[in-house]
Amino acid sequence: MINNRSLLIVGGLAAVAWLASNSLYVVDETERAVKLRFGEVIEENIQPGLHVKVPITQTIRKFDTRLLTLDTDTSRYLTLEQKAVIVDSYVKWQVINPTRYYEATAGDELMATRLIQPRVDESLRNEFGRLDLQEIIAERRDDLMTGPAEELDQLMRDELGVAIRDIRIKRIDLPEDVSAAVYERMRSEREREAREWRAQGEEESERIRANADRRRQVLLAQATERSETLRGEGDAEASAIFAEAYSGDQEFYTFWRSLNAYRDSFAGDGNMLVLDPSSDFFRYLKSPTSSSE
């Protein structure tokens, strides 16, 4: 009886454990889930946490709702002028409607990428087809992909229950037969811009140089006028001083002028003067007064 009772207890505990393990389930923070009954969705978008289901008849499908990356195949697209470009891109996408995602893909991520990639390829083909090569080269890649990303996002929300968060271009290459022509066109364009900038620079330099020369002439004229005025004022003042000194003591002024003349005449080596000894030039050498002896 004791062994039977123990077996019943163990069996009961096992049944409870089995029932709990098959009735309780946890949805992680990075997941969303749907509840199925014989393959039919009976509860949508189950949020993270602990939940209960009916064993055997009900099943749970969980989906990763984190941001996923689809690295698309390198594709060749034609521009508006029918020139080919080779584009390598990738897509960031995310499950936002678990029910629609399950119905469209059976919850298979590989199936989802197979459905998304052709749509991305079509969207990029349309976008590159409405732009010429110069616009593709000149425009920022982020701005170039804004339109296709928004258009594709709305489409994928309805079809697959996923959101297209971003489309990014990793690389845009030109075929060899197009590269030479494009590079030559770019070089010609840059040379034209360089010539324009040089012409504008030369014009500006001539204008600055002419303005500087004009200002120089004005400043020189003003300086010359000022110097002549100061020189004339100085000469007038010197003449007035000399006149005043001469009138104050004519004898001393004459003596001082003679000494300066002697100093200037005999300042150099080997100077020789041929003069009459009785000349007034030597009068202060003969006598300290101005009277002649």
Image (spheres, rainbow, N blue to C red):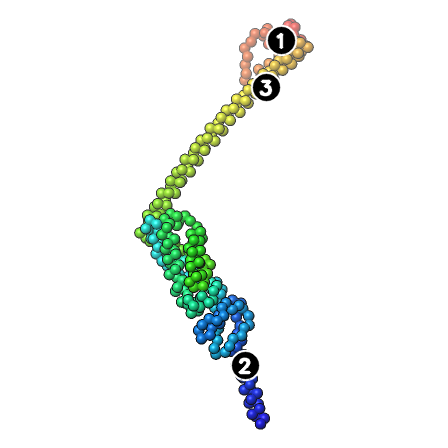
Q: How many marks?
A: 3
Q: Nearer the viewer, residue 239 or 1?
A: 1
Q: Residue 172 at what x, y percent from top left?
A: 39, 54
**What mark, if any, has residue 283 been given in the picture?**
1
Q: Is residue 146 visible?
A: yes
Report crowding for label 3: few under 14, some 14 to 19, many 20 or more residues within 10 A (C-alpha): few
- Mark 2 vs 3, N-terminal side: 2
Nearer the viewer's eye, disc 1 or disc 2? Answer: 2
Report crowding for label 1: few under 14, some 14 to 19, many 20 or more residues within 10 A (C-alpha): some
Q: Nearer the viewer, residue 162 or 93?
A: 162
Residue type, numbered disc 1: Arg
Residue, disc 3: 230
Tell me how far mark 2 sits from mark 3, CA to CA: 118 Å
Secondary structure of the residue carrying numbered label 1: helix
Residue type, numbered disc 3: Leu
From this view, report whether residue 13 is shown above or below residue 114: below
- Mark 1 vs 2, N-terminal side: 2
The outermost residue toward the right is 248
Residue drawn at x 53%, y 83% is 15
The outermost residue toward the bottom is 1
Q: Residue 104 at what x, y percent from top left?
A: 41, 66
From this view, report whether residue 154 is shown above or below residue 210: below
Nearer the viewer's eye, disc 1 or disc 3? Answer: 3
- Mark 1 vs 3, N-terminal side: 3
**What mark, if any, has residue 252 been given in the picture?**
none
Q: Is residue 27 left or right of residue 106?
A: right
Q: Is residue 58 left or right of residue 118?
A: right
